[in-house]
Amino acid sequence: MSCFRFLKGMMFIFNGIIFVAGIIILAIGVWVKVDSSSFLKILTIIKVGGLSQIINVGYLCIALGLFLMIVGFLGCWGALKENKALLMLFFVIVLLIFIVEVTGGVVVLAFSSLAEVLVEGIGVEAKKSIKIDYGKNADITKVWDSLMTELKCCGFANYDDFTDSPFYVSTKNYPPVCCSNSTSCIQADAMLSKISGCYLSLLRFLKDHAMVLGGVAMGIAGLELAALVVSMVLFCKITPR
C-alpha cells in the first residue's frame, strides 16, 4: 500500500510538472504572437516561399500549452479517483504526445543548424524590400524600424542596404539606428558607428530560440516517459471496484 501511495504521489508530481510546462509553452506562444512579431511580419510582407507560415508557431505553442495543461489535470484526477479508464486515456494521450514531441524536438534542434541557410535565403528579398519600399511603404518602414531597434542592428547586411532607397533619396540620410540613434545619420557617421547588419542578429535569434524550444520539448518528453511508466503501473495495480 505504501508503494501504491508513493506511485500516486509520483503521478501528481509528474503531472504537476507537465501542467506547469504547459503554462510555460503557452506563455512562449503568447510571447511569439505579442512581443516578437517584427521578424514574423517581415517574412509575411516579403512573402518568401512558405516561410511566412512560421507565424503559425505561436498558435501551435498556445494550443500545445493548453493541451498539456488538460493532460496534466487528467492524470492527476485519474490517480486521485483511482479510475482505470481515466488512467488508460491518460496513457494513450501522453504516448501520442510523447511521439509527436520527440519528433518535433529533433526537427527544431535540426532547424537550429539550418538557421544560417534560412536567413541567407531571405536576404535577397529582405534587401529588395529595403531598396524599393523603405521610406515609401509605411508598413514595411515601420517593421524594419521596429526590428532594427529591437535587435540593435542596421539593414540586412549593413547600412549600405539603405543607399538609393526612397528614404535615402528623400533625406540623404540613413536610419537613425544606423548611427546609434543620432538625429541625423550621414554615410560617414554610419561607417564610424560600425553597427552590424540584422543578418547576424537574426541568425543568433533563430538559433537561440530554436535551441530553447527544442530543449523544452525534449525535457517535457522525458517527464512524459516517466509519467507513462507510472500511469501504467498504477493502472495494473488498481483493482476494479
Image: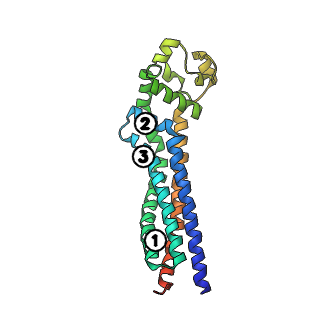
- Cα separation, mark 2 vs mark 1, equals 38 Å
Which residue matches tag 2? 43
- The residue shown at (47%, 44%) is 115
User: Foreground: 108 or 84?
Assistant: 84
**Three-letter code, disc 2:** Leu
Answer few, some or many: residues within 10 Å of disc 1's Cα (few below 14, many 20 plus, some between 14 and 19). many
- The residue shown at (55%, 37%) is 201
User: Foreground: 7 or 128?
Assistant: 7
14 displayed left or right of 99: right
146 displayed left or right of 99: right
- Cα separation, mark 3 vs mark 1, equals 27 Å
Which residue matches tag 3? 56
- Looking at the image, the residue that sits furthest to the left is 49
Which residue matches tag 1? 90
> Which sits earlier in the primary sequence, circle 2 or circle 3?
2
Camera-side mark, 2 or 3: 3
**What x and y, as percent, mark residue 198?**
53, 32
Residue 175 in sight from this viewpoint = yes
Q: Quadrant of residue 97?
A: bottom left
Asked if labels 1 and 3 touch by Cβ distance under 8 angstroms, the answer is no
Answer few, some or many: residues within 10 Å of disc 3's Cα (few below 14, many 20 plus, some between 14 and 19). few
169 displayed left or right of 4: left
